[in-house]
Image (spheres, helix red, strand yellow):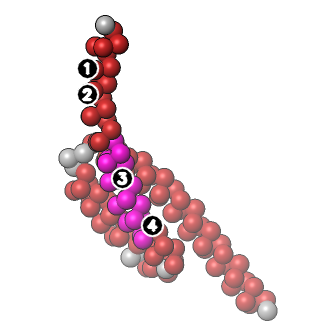
Amino acid sequence: SIQGISPKKPVAQDSTHEEPSKPSVIQETNEPVNSTPSVNYTSEARLPVLSKSGNDEPEKEEEKSEVDEEDSDDHEERKKKEKKDKKKSKKHKKSKKHKKEKKKKEKKKSEDY
């Protein structure tokens, strides 16, 4: 009797609730989140000069407001995006430092030669 009740009630609800929503949510968050930051990331990485001129800051603000508008209805998605944003911003800082260091090294090399 336990087997008949428990899989039918919770599992039926869980599987219908979790299975369609979780994969779809994961796909939804992963696709747009991954596609937009990756585009931003490459453009920022390719144009470190832009980030110096300050063009990079408004870009980030725009991205954040977009994320907020999109996810104001979905708390879970918002949390996932915020986590990703935090990770992203850390990576950004590192990559920018590396870019600057690389530029300095390249300049030194070109001056030496």
The one of 88 and 16 positioned closer to us in this rendering = 16
Q: Is residue 97 above or below residue 46?
A: above
Q: CA distance from mark 3 to mark 4?
A: 16 Å
Q: What is the quadrant of the N terminus in the image?
A: top left
- For disc 1, the marked residue is 9
Dot 1: few (<14), some (14–19), or many (≥20) neighbours within 10 Å?
few
Amino acid type of the residue tagged 1 in the rendering = Lys
Dot 2: few (<14), some (14–19), or many (≥20) neighbours within 10 Å?
few
Magenta residues, as a range? 22-40
Count of all numbered marks drawn on residues in the image = 4
Amino acid type of the residue tagged 2 in the rendering = Gln
Q: Earlier in the sequence, mark 1 or mark 4?
A: 1
Q: CA distance from mark 3 to mark 1?
A: 27 Å
Q: Which marked residue is nearer to the observer: mark 2 or mark 3? A: 2
Q: Which marked residue is nearer to the observer: mark 3 or mark 4? A: 3
Dot 4: few (<14), some (14–19), or many (≥20) neighbours within 10 Å?
few
Q: Earlier in the sequence, mark 4 or mark 2?
A: 2
Q: Earlier in the sequence, mark 2 or mark 3?
A: 2
- For disc 3, the marked residue is 27
| Label 3–label 4 contact, CB within 8 A | no
Q: Earlier in the sequence, mark 3 or mark 4?
A: 3
The label shown at residue 13 is 2
At mark 1, the secondary structure is: helix
Q: Is residue 2 above or below residue 96?
A: above
| Label 1–label 4 contact, CB within 8 A | no
Q: Which marked residue is nearer to the observer: mark 3 or mark 1? A: 1
Q: CA distance from mark 2 to mark 3?
A: 21 Å
- For disc 4, the marked residue is 38
On the image, which quarter does residue 60 sit in?
Answer: bottom left
